[in-house]
Image (cartoon, rainbow, N blue to C red):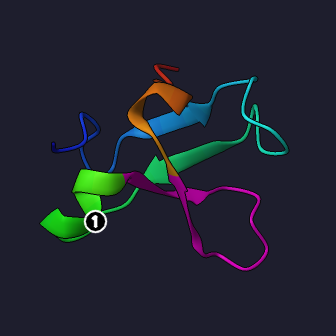
Amino acid sequence: MKSKWMPGTRVRVKDEVEELGGWLGTVQPVNYAEWAAATAVLLDDDEWQLDAWFGDDELEEVTA
């Protein structure tokens, strides 16, 4: 199953996700095998600038 999020989409991690709820980030492009498992997001305030992985239902689109 492919992620519903397109690379470059701005997203917010839902509040119910422990430790990272409320963080903003940008969906990153990954290979198809990785899309099947989770969505890679580069979080704005991550000092290490590593992708975090989330299920589709753990993210919501930022429109503003």
Q: Is residue 42 left or right of residue 47?
A: left
On screen, 38 above or below 30?
A: above
Spot the residue most to the right.
19
Q: Looking at the rendering, in which quadrant would you find the N terminus?
A: top left
Whether residue 7 appears in magenta in the rendering, the answer is no
How far from the left and from the top, in percent, is residue 53?
51, 57
Label 1 packing within 10 angstroms: few (<14), some (14-19), many (20+): some
Q: Nearer the viewer, residue 60 or 32?
A: 32
The reply to whether residue 44 is in sight is yes
In the image, the segment drawn in magenta is 38-53
Q: Is residue 40 magenta?
A: yes
Q: Secondary structure at mark 1?
A: helix
- The residue at the point 64 percent across, 75 percent down is 49
Q: Which residue is mark 1?
A: 34
Q: Is residue 59 visible?
A: no
- Is the residue 48 above or below the residue 44 in the image? below
Q: How many marks?
A: 1
The quarter holding residue 20 reads: top right
Q: Is residue 51 positioned above or below 62 on the image?
A: below
Q: Horizontally, is 21 left or right of 14 in the view?
A: right
- Hey, which residue is sitting farthest bottom in the picture? 48
Write the residue at 76% across / 34% down. 21
